Amino acid sequence: TGLNADLEYIEAVIKHLATISELPLVGAEDLVDATQNTDAYTEVSAALKVCMMNMSKIANDLRLMASGPRVGLAEIMLPARQPGSSIMPGKVNPVMPEVINQIAFQVIGNDHTICLAS
């Protein structure tokens, strides 16, 4: 709340943090509200979650479009990033879309944790 801190100290800390982080940091307008409520963190986390949900959708679409050639769509060819299958020569695993999904699931889980903690 800044109750026991000198105003010059608070301003100096904010300025120092802005300098070392190279971010346009400013102090909260209402320090009591900023101390009690975590809605700002929840909003940022939710925005990241929505972004990653969209990325996951794109990754799933890419994986579906690259499936095939016999029973899938085979509309696009993903570049090979690792060996495929020993029993299916030439198979290309959708490694990058899978990585995007793993990251998305982590971000979505983190958002849920932040929501519960708020």
Image (cartoon, grey):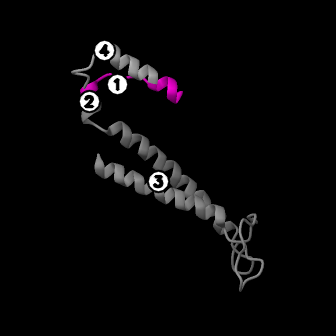
Q: Do the numbered discs 4 and 3 sit on residues whose CB atoms are within 8 Å?
A: no
Going from N to C along the chain, the mark reached first, 2 or 4, is 4
How far, Cα to Cα, is label 2 from label 4? Answer: 17 Å
Which is more foreground, mark 4 or mark 3? 4
Relative to 69, 44 lies left or right: left
How far, Cα to Cα, is label 4 from label 3? Answer: 37 Å
Going from N to C along the chain, the mark reached first, 1 or 4, is 4
* Amino acid at the residue labelled 1: Ala
How far, Cα to Cα, is label 1 from label 2? Answer: 9 Å
Q: Where in the figure is residue 97, as x and y percent of width and height?
A: 62, 62
Query: Where is the C terminus found, in terms of image quarters?
Result: top left
- Residue at image position (32%, 22%) is 29
Name the mark on residue 33.
Answer: 2
Query: In what element is the residue under mark 3?
Result: helix
Q: Residues within 10 Å of mark 3 (few under 14, many from 20)?
A: many
Q: Do the numbered discs 1 and 2 sit on residues whose CB atoms are within 8 Å?
A: yes
The residue beneath circle 3 is 107
The residue beneath circle 4 is 7
Q: Nearer the viewer, residue 33 or 53?
A: 33
Query: In what element is the residue under mark 1?
Result: loop
Residue 25 magenta-drawn? yes
* Amino acid at the residue labelled 2: Asp
- Residue at image position (34%, 25%) is 28
Q: Where in the figure is residue 74, as x and y percent of width and height?
A: 74, 71
Query: In what element is the residue under mark 2?
Result: helix
Going from N to C along the chain, the mark reached first, 1 or 3, is 1
Query: Where is the N terminus found, in terms of image quarters?
Result: top left
The residue beneath circle 1 is 28
